[in-house]
Image (cartoon, rainbow, N blue to C red):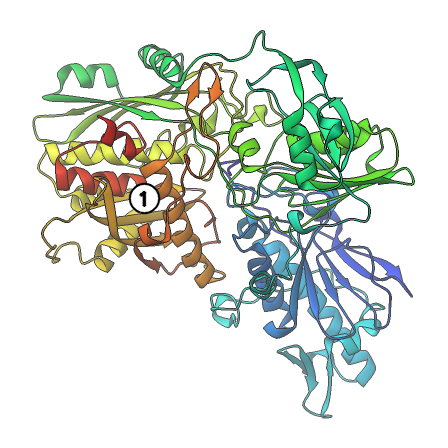
Amino acid sequence: MHILKRIARKSISRRDFLRVSGGVGVGLVVGFDAFAQASGAAAVLRAAGVETVDATGFVKIAPDNTVTVLIKHLEMGQGPYTGLATLVAEELDADWSQMRAEGAPANNDLYKNLAFGVQGTGGSTAVANSYEQMRRAGATARAMLVAAAAESWKVPASEIAVKQGVLRHAGSGRQSTFGELAEVAARQTPPKDVTLKSPKDFILIGKQLPRLDAGAKSTGRAIFTIDMQRPDALTVMVSHPPRFGAKVISFDDSAARRVRGIVDVKTIPQGVAVYANGFWAAKKAREALRVEWDESGTERRSSEELIAIYRSAAQAPDVTATSRGNVRQALEQAQRVFEAEYVFPYLAHAPLEPMDCAIELRNGSVEAWYGCQFPGVDHKVIADSMGLPLEKVKVNVLFAGGSFGRRAQPTGDVAAEAAAALKALGREASIKLMWTREDDMRGGRYRPLIVHRVRGALDKDGSIAAWDHVVVGQSIIKGTAFEAMMTDGVDPTTVEGVSDLSYTVPNVRVSARTMDVGVPILWWRSVGHTHTAYAKETFIDELLAASGKDPVAGRLALLKDHPREAGVLRAVAEAANWKASTLDAGRARGVAVHKSFESYVAQIAEVSRGRDGLPKVEHVWCAVDCGVAVNPDNVKSQMEGGIGFGLGAILFDEITLNEGRVMQANYNDYRMLRIGEMPRVDVVVVPSAEPPTGVGEPGVPPIGPAVANAWRALTGQTVRHLPFARILAV
């Protein structure tokens, strides 16, 4: 999920003053006053023997010597629990075995994401926006522990060493753990500034460490929303409209109320809510409902109708995102002109855990528990829906069973539905809103349907003289709280990845046309890059082939002004032995390189023809430059996961509309990549001293074009209308 292209980078200097709060019985909160409004950087040292304090900071040190880092980013499998805890542990000089992590509750003031101003996870920003923030929190806590030891032992602080969670003074032989010193540390004056380690002194950053969430998830101890069981909670399921935008006229619940376990049925803005003692009772009662819908004004066009409209619109773009040189003149004077059209279907996120939320009203206050990707948004949505002030609402962030952008809702859809269902009961209660796989597949939101029209010109020397690119689709951010991101009428998420074309082409124009369609859409893992990378990298491959140039060498020549993209391209070519390799008969390779979320990724895919007639991806080589790799093993895991995720989508997946109704329902007709279809993946993490950038999404964009380019080399067939499965019907 991507919110901003540019990650806000803020440094903390001497002008950012520390604040301290707390006292006996409440622990110590150390934060950065000037920085707190933007980030809430804070360290909490829990005094020995004190009851658990409210999670109002970033670090808690307990009497048992465990160090718990409060993570402001949702853990949905991408690794922020481990990544951000590593940053704290590095500067704290803690031992990794004492580190723990918990999800931070909703609190925009303390935990807002520096990239987009509210507490939320997306855009591959977790480590990038917290790199200095979390290190400084750890360094501040360390300094106060050292000061506590110096006071207790009557020795100079400069003589105290900290290593693997133990403070030592060589001269006196004294030593203590963090937990033993926490109470004294709570009385120390925090330093006005701290010095962070030089990268050459890193002990944990850049090393392979066990993931903090792996044990709980492997043993079943991890609590996801679907596991949450509140006392006396009712299960709620909502009958949603069959077409987007339909409203309830009336309903007959007589049959539903005969289902054993049914408790109540209510109309809410999102549909008709069924309340029952358990999932199956709720599901059966919902199936027994008879609902009359007002479908006037709903979206009734089919996918094919929309594609035809988009194709026409691509001939007349209305907004220019990028322009340099004179594209029209270059096209007119070109030796050869090539044109291509690309069609990308609606895509569902299809996370393993469908949408859900546990929420209850007690004593005039509301508390919710769920895998919340945008707590800063949902907190207010729940408060507004319930008619309560923010301080009367608490959102607890649990593990999420995947998201890929699905849970990052700018309007808090699921939170609003859960709150509406709770409020409709008109009494104190606890409920658990549950969606089925079919609800999620057919209930929106999707990666937008997109059509690209690209023209490229070669001059008499075979050089690329012009690039004219039009992108047509719905805007993800138009009409949302993020609409301010739009520039001159262009949604940056529509054209990202081509509006900043890295290839050296003298004449470039990138245009867009925004379409109004009544289908709810949302950012999908790597957002606009999912389609722009495919169009850009397959089209450049065709232009290079037409001029007789090697795909790798040709790209390198065009990337002379972009060393980091060239660097990952060289690295992946070396890893795959691109120049010297001899392929087995019936195999071919393709390459792609793309920058997204400030990270640079190049991939080479080796494919054969599978028994089903589709590409069988045998091997993928991947090189990534994401700045400092805080957890290299996690970087590799995210590249591997992104490759699998992207590969399944380009081979098999599409959401199709028939008279406005979604035709797919479950994994049987929107299938995932199967384990036997996952290729061997080799990942090279390019060493870098640059600040860390995102890894959750950048592995996705290059895999599609790398496979497509290999397939064209193998078969001569160019696939421009995804998914690949469509070629079997041609």
SS class, disc 1: helix
Residue at the limit of the structure toward the bottom, as seen here: 172
Where is residue 711? Give x, y as percent: 19, 40
Q: Residue at x 40, y 52 (%)?
A: 639
Residue at the limit of the structure toward the top, as seen here: 296
Report the side of 269 relative to 717 (left or right): right
Viewer-proximal residue among 684 and 609: 609
Q: Which residue is mark 1?
A: 703
Is 454 placed above or below 683 here? above
Q: Residue at x 47, y 68 (%)?
A: 208
Where is residue 611? Give x, y as percent: 21, 45
Where is residue 140? Give x, y as percent: 70, 64
Is 559 placed above or below 19 here? above
Amino acid of disc 1: Ile
> How many discs appear?
1
Report the side of 173 relative to 20 (left or right): left
Q: Residue at x 16, y 46 (%)?
A: 553
Report the side of 583 relative to 559 (left or right): left
Report the side of 118 relative to 234 (left or right): left
Q: Would residue 321 be seen by someone viewing this image from the given angle?
A: yes
Where is residue 689? Give x, y as percent: 43, 59
Q: Residues within 10 Å of mark 1 (few under 14, many from 20)?
A: many
Viewer-proximal residue among 723 and 147: 723
